[in-house]
Amino acid sequence: MQYNKHLNTIDITDRGLAYGDGLFETIALINGQLHHWKLHWQRMINGCKKLALNLPDENQLLEQIQQQLNTQNILSNGVIKLILTRGSGGRGYLFPENQDENLIISYHQWPERNIEDYTNGINTIVCKTALAKQPALSGIKHLNRLEQVLARNEFDNEKYQDGVMLSHAEQGSPFVIEGCSSNLFFVLNSKLCTPKIDNCGILGTMRQAIIDFGLENPLFLVQEDNFELQQLEQATEVFFTNSIYGILPVASISYRTKQQLQQWFYNERTIIRSLANQFNTQLQRPFEL
């Protein structure tokens, strides 16, 4: 397996470029440590199984990441991005006869976020772009993220800081799935809920960490189910989770109707504060919300 640390030398025949044929992981680097590495690694294992990619050796991969950090003399917090493609191949969708995956490791500066996003909560809008149902690809972070790209460009940063994405529904009501680059949680009838990720969406590492935390702490036991948009209107608390930004409380959700733009507001923070105290501190993000 090739290790490519120079992003500008990717071969033009690489299937990751041609078809989005590959996976990626975005990992927080905190005080020189890969945050929630085991959760990222498990998702990479699952992704390689689904896409029939050869899995890198874990120890060698960790050594390569450390080598890059040492080479660049990186001592501060940041973001490590891993991209694994099927490597080069000719035209056509058939897997290459001799599959030689390409592994790209890159480091990025730690992204700051407005303190108001944590203290006041973020404003969101329900996106027009829906997520297609495809169980074979659900859960993993494959390289084809055009749905998220289109959804994210439906709104600007000043008015809305994230978007709620729904599943595509030809009949019946669509289900709430996630944010453009985050997973969604909410408190409904005193229960902590999150949408099921079985037909579309990403199984986020922070999402999984909260679910695991709930198994050990019954107060935060998570209910995974199919939820409709109307149930978010009845929720008392809503928040997004992300491996880099941690837990972000939602202040409002706007929803376009044929007649008007409807808006729901959320003020409660009881569960959010408790979880932020547990998880945001690990990422050195605000937790006294």
Image (cartoon, rainbow, N blue to C red):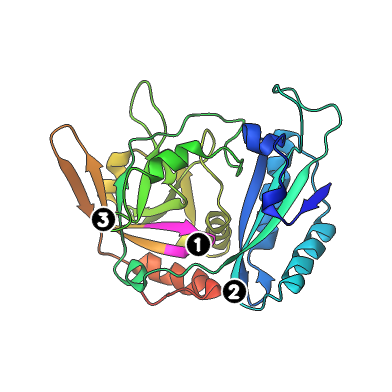
Residue at the location (50% across, 72% down)?
278
What residue is pinned by disc 2?
77
What secondary structure is marked by label 3?
A: loop
Residue at the location (50% across, 62% down)?
218
Residue at the location (54% across, 60% down)?
243
Nearer to the camera, 61 or 156: 156
The amino acid at mark 2 is Asn
- Which label lies toward us, 1 or 3? 3
Residue 30, given in percent of the width and then of the height, sits at 61, 73
The amino acid at mark 1 is Pro
Mark 3 surroundings within 10 Å by alpha-carbon count, few (fewer than 14), some (14 through 19), many (20 or more): few
Nearer to the camera, 193 or 5: 5
Q: Farthest left residue?
A: 259
The amino acid at mark 3 is Lys
* Picture quarter with the C terminus: bottom left
Q: Is 21 in the magenta?
A: no
Mark 1 surroundings within 10 Å by alpha-carbon count, few (fewer than 14), some (14 through 19), many (20 or more): few
- Which label lies toward us, 2 or 1? 2
> Dominant secondary structure of the magenta stretch?
strand
Give the residues drawn in magenta, as a range.
Answer: 239-247
Residue 159, labelled with which disc? 3
Residue 90, given in percent of the width and then of the height, sits at 75, 26
